[in-house]
Each structure stands twice: as C-alpha cells, then as structure tokens.
Amino acid sequence: MKPRRAREPRLRDPETGEWDVAEVKHRTKGWVAVVLALVIVFGGIWFVGGKAWDAWMSFRTKDDYIGAGVDPIQVEIPRGATMTAVGKLLEEKDVVKSADSFRRYAQSRPDESSRVQAGRYNMKTQMSVIAAFDALLDSNNLVRNTMQLREGQRTSEQLAAMAAATKLPVEEFQAIAKSPGNLGLPTWANGNVDGFLFPDTYELGSTPTAEGTMKMTVDNFNNVLERNDWVTQATNSPAKDPHSALVMASLVEREATTTEDRQKVARVFYNRLAKGQALQSDATVAYANNITGRVTTTPEERKLDSPYNTYLDKNAGKLPPTPISSPSEDAMQAAVAPADGNWLFFVVVNLDTGETVFSDTYDQHLKAVAQFQEFCKTSDKC
C-alpha cells in the first residue's frame, strides 16, 4: 500500500470555519518574503539596465546624432565626391556629428554608396549617419534644377532655353557658339554648333556656367555617336559622311514624327539628291526666312536667295550647308538607315494625326496635296 500523504495545514477548520491564526501568519511571512525578493531583483535590473542604457547612449552620441534631424538645410554634393569627402561636407554643415562615422557606415553599404548622385539635397541638421545616408539615396530629396532642349529646335532657340534655365545672359551662350573651341565638338563639325547641342533633359548644378552647360549637351551628342557607332554608319549610308548625315537628320526631324515616316522621308530626300532634284523642303525655307509656328511657306518666301532654300533651282541636288535643327537620336538613325522605296514626294495630309502620304509620281503627289488642302479648310494649323 502507498503511504498516506500528510494532511497539509489548512487556513480554516472545515468543520468550524475558524481561521488558523498561526498558519495565516506563517504563510503571510512567506508571501512578503517573495514580494520583497522580487522587488529587489527587478529593482536591480532596472538600476543596472538604466546605467547600461545611459552608457550606450553616451557611446552613441559621442560620434553620432540620434534621430532624423532638426532644422532643414540644403547640401551640395559635388560630382565625383568620395564618401570620405561627403562625410566631411556633412560634418561641416552639422548634418552629421562625425565625418568618420559617416564614412565607416557608408563603407558598410558599398553597393548603395555608389548610387549617391551629385546634386543639391534637402536634408536636416543633426541627423544620425543612418538617416543622412538614407536621405542621400532618396531621389525625392534631390533639388531638381533642370534644363530641357526639345528635338527640332534651332540653335537660337536652344541658347535661349539655356539662358532661361541657368539665369545667365543669352549673350554668354551666343559668344561661346561663335567660338566653340572648348566644347569638344567633333572635327567634322567645322567649328559650328548647329545640330550638335543634343536635345535632352539635363540636370544643372547650383551654379552652372554657360560653357559648362553647352559642353554638357555636346558631350551627350558625342555619347550618342559612340553608342551607335554612328560615324561609321553615316560613312556607309547614302549620305557618305557624318556631317551630311547630320544635316539630313535635321531635315528629317522637322518633316516627320514617327520612326517609320522619318525613315521614308530620308529615303525621299536621298532619291531626289540622286536624281539632282531640289529637295523642296518647307522646313528649310522656314529656317532661311526665320519663320516659326507654321509648316507651310508662301511663294514669296520660297523665292528667298539662300543656300538653305531647297526650292531654288541653283540648290538642286544639294543639302543645306549646316543642320537646320538639333535632331533626336531617332532622326539620326533614320538618316543613316533610310527605308527602301522609290518615293520622290511626301506630304502630311492631316496635321492632327501626322498622317503622311508618300508618292512615286507627281500626279500621285498632287492628289495627296489636294487632301492636305481639304484638311486646311477647317484647321488653323496650316
């Protein structure tokens, strides 16, 4: 048989319901002891933990700020700056407490460090190195100072756009255009910037210069040449040389909008050149007469004595002497890779949609011209 367990003391007698005073006192002392022990343990933990937290915060704040920052500030990161240089700049502006702390943290994220762009950033003073580094990776913090050059603009329009974007006198740009020796133009540009200021959207620094701004657009043009091996393509194209191909591209840019139509327009012009015919491009007549805002020209305007007037018999079989606009990459490609076809004429018959009719014969062309004239009866775009 199993031994019977001793009866545990009870606080109350089950028969009389009276409290066992001695047992209550005994158990109360035990509970008090437990509570006191817990107070001592947790108090010690709180004391030690508080001291540890104070020590940690003291360690952290010695070389770093805590948090996302205090007062707004703008910081300019120079092009090509190393993380060491960036850290020193941020310390000077009181964005971070220690340049070394920023550098060490940036080194722990090497892949992301390479993504930090040059430019002006919206930041805050007294940021933690983590917050400062993340702010430089966030493109939303970049202060955008942009300049846009549109496809098909003349040089005069581009220089005006540069002056407006940089808030510099247009005369500075005009002077450089006349003496562009420092811009890095290809040798076959013959010292003329027309067509070489590549249309694109550009990021400007906080203190742009006229020469730096213009050089940036020429550098972009040279990158397009290299990326497409365009000079080789031009040499092997009907244009025979890169300068003639760029002149052709400038005409194509003004005469068509889609890739397919640009390739066809280039073929029309090459076919006419091969036959010794005048190109009869209204875009060149508009350029010669300094006309903007309309696609058609008048008989009087088409009589202007100018090497850019491709309606004149004396200019038959010739391209204009220089580009009449800055062409897009698409137009440049059309000039060196025209479509195959026997077309000799083209006309846009709907200026709203850009629909263009290409014809082999003059009679076919006259029918297309009639379509265009019908369109012009109800449109103010002609």
Image (spheres, rainbow, N blue to C red):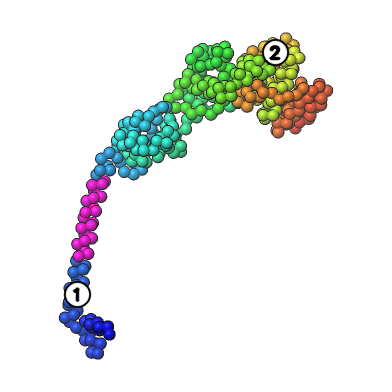
What is the chief secondary structure element of the magenta stretch?
A: helix
Q: Residue furthest top?
A: 314
Q: Is residue 191 above or below residue 198?
A: above
- Amino acid at dot 2: Lys
Q: Could you give the CA–CA distance between mark 2 and mark 1, rounded to whole angstroms? A: 115 Å
* Residue density around tag 1, few if under 14, some if 14–19, many if 20 or more, within 10 Å: few
User: How many marks overall?
Assistant: 2
Which of the two residues, 34 or 344, is positioned nearer the viewer here? 34
Q: Position of residue 15 (x, y in %)?
A: 24, 90
Identity of the residue drawn at 60% across and 21% down: 230
Which of the two residues, 285 or 238, is positioned nearer the viewer here? 238
Kindly identify which residue carries mark 1: 28
Q: Per the image, is 68 magenta?
A: no
Identity of the residue drawn at 39% across and 28% down: 81
Q: Quadrant of residue 356?
A: top right
N-terminal of the pair, mark 2 or mark 1, is 1
> Where's the C terminus, which quadrant?
top right
Kindly identify which residue carries mark 2: 318
> Where's the N terminus, which quadrant?
bottom left
